[in-house]
Structure formats: C-alpha cells, structure tokens
Image (tube, rainbow, N blue to C red):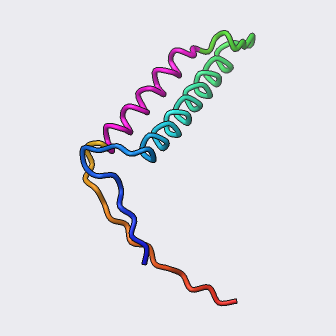
Amino acid sequence: MNRITTSKKFAINLYDVLKAAATAGLTAGIAIVGQTLEAWTESPSFSFKDISLALALKAAFGAFAGYLIKNFLSPSKVIIKKEENIVE
C-alpha cells in the first residue's frame, strides 16, 4: 500500500502552491466568463473593453490566498492507496 501524507499543519509545500495557482487561474477564468456573459446580455454592442481585468485579478488573488490559508491551517492527513494487481 502506498502512503501519501499531505502537508503538515502550519506548513505549505510546493504542491499546495501549484494547486492554489490552478485554483486562482480557474477562478479568474470564471470571473471573466461571468463578466462577458453579463456584458453580452445587457448590450447588443458587446466589446471586450467592458470586461474588468482588475476584478478578475482580485478574484484570482482571493482564491489563491484562501486556498493557501486553508491548507496552512488544515491538519495533515495520511492517504492510503491500495496497490492494484493487474493481470495480463
């Protein structure tokens, strides 16, 4: 069996930072799509100038910081994975 331990409480590892960056990227993308849909439905003359990149960056920073804070305060967990026997 494989044992995987998540980062310890009050510690952040590289994997946590990478997952936080992925979460921030997805959050920024969702914020941009939401703004695009809102601008598109409100006016027939849609322009990408109506989209606020500052709002998307604020949302991304909030998601990044929130994910890291959550992982910093969460206790460590041990995940046990069973090895699968593959017969060919």
Depth check: 82 or 44 in front?
82
> Which percent across, then down, holds residue 62?
41, 27
Depth check: 48 or 9 in front?
9
Depth check: 1 or 41 in front?
1
Q: Is residue 62 magenta?
A: yes
Q: Quick check: 19 above or below 29?
A: below
Give the main secondary structure, helix, strand or loop, of the magenta stretch: helix
State the quadrant of the C terminus: bottom right
> Which percent across, then down, holds residue 1?
42, 78
Residue at the image point whose x is 59% and y is 31% from the top? 29
Q: In this view, does 38 lie to the left or right of 1?
A: right
Magenta residues, start to end: 52-71
Number of numbered discs on residues: 0
Q: Quick check: 34 above or below 75?
A: above
> Which percent across, then down, holds residue 31?
55, 27
> Which percent across, then down, holds residue 65?
38, 31
Q: Is residue 48 magenta?
A: no
Q: Quick check: 84 above or below 54?
A: below
Q: Is residue 73 left or right of residue 5?
A: left
Residue at the image point whose x is 50% and y is 79% from the top? 83
Residue at the image point whose x is 58% and y is 27% from the top? 34
Q: Quick check: 88 above or below 68?
A: below
Tell me the quarter of the picture where residue 77 sits: bottom left
Q: Is residue 67 left or right of residue 47?
A: left
Q: In this view, does 28 lie to the left or right of 80?
A: right
Residue projecting furthest to the right: 45
